[in-house]
Image (cartoon, helix red, strand yellow):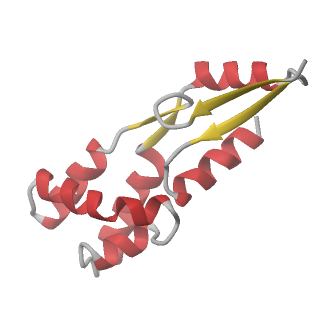
């Protein structure tokens, strides 16, 4: 008998926390954390479907011209917003070894984080 399970990526297989990123935008651009978060939210649907990358959002929505600031923010975005939950990933590895179980991974993470997650899961 074949079974099916769907797992959400965000805050199940991975932890997602935008606070450090929002604080860094606020600090670098001298704007409130509310404004940084609000402007991020305006672009979220475009990032989720892959129409905009975070680089494009930072350059257009936040008008960042400095490559130093851009690199700093992208480093936080790529390395600290999404972190892997090793216990859940071990569980995922365990259940994915069952040939009678089909697993679907669902999420609304943007394409940049989705690619990172895909690479991480496939090398386990």
Identify the residue shown where x is 35% and y is 39%: 17
Q: 8 or 82, which is in the foreground?
A: 8
Identify the residue shown where x is 65% and y is 31%: 6
In this image, 40 relative to 110: left or right? Answer: left
| Quarter of the image that includes the C terminus | top right
Q: Quadrant of residue 8?
A: top right
Res. 66 visible in picture: no
Tag count = 0
Residue 30 percent across, percent down from the top left = 10, 63
Res. 37 visible in picture: yes
| Quarter of the image that includes the N terminus | top right
Residue 103 percent across, percent down from the top left = 74, 32
Instruction: In the displayed orientation, state which residue is furthest to the front.
Output: 1
Identify the residue shown where x is 40% and y is 60%: 45
Q: 59 or 100, which is in the foreground?
A: 100
In this image, 84 relative to 11: left or right? Answer: right
Q: Quadrant of residue 72?
A: bottom left
In the rendered view, tell whether residue 101 sits above or below residue 55.
above
In this image, 3 relative to 111: left or right? Answer: right
Residue 109 percent across, percent down from the top left = 49, 50
């Amino acid at each position: 008998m074949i079974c099916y399970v769907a797992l959400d990526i965000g805050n199940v297989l991975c932890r997602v926390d935008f606070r450090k990123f929002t604080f860094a935008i606020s600090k670098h651009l001298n704007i409130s954390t509310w404004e940084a978060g609000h402007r991020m939210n305006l672009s979220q649907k475009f990032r989720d479907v892959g129409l905009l990358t975070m680089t494009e959002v930072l350059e257009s929505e936040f008008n960042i011209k400095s490559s130093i600031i851009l690199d700093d923010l992208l480093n936080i975005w790529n390395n600290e917003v999404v972190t892997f939950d090793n216990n859940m990933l071990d569980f995922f590895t365990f259940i994915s070894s069952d040939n009678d179980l089909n697993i679907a991974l669902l999420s609304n993470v943007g394409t940049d984080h989705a690619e990172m997650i895909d690479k991480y899961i496939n090398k386990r």
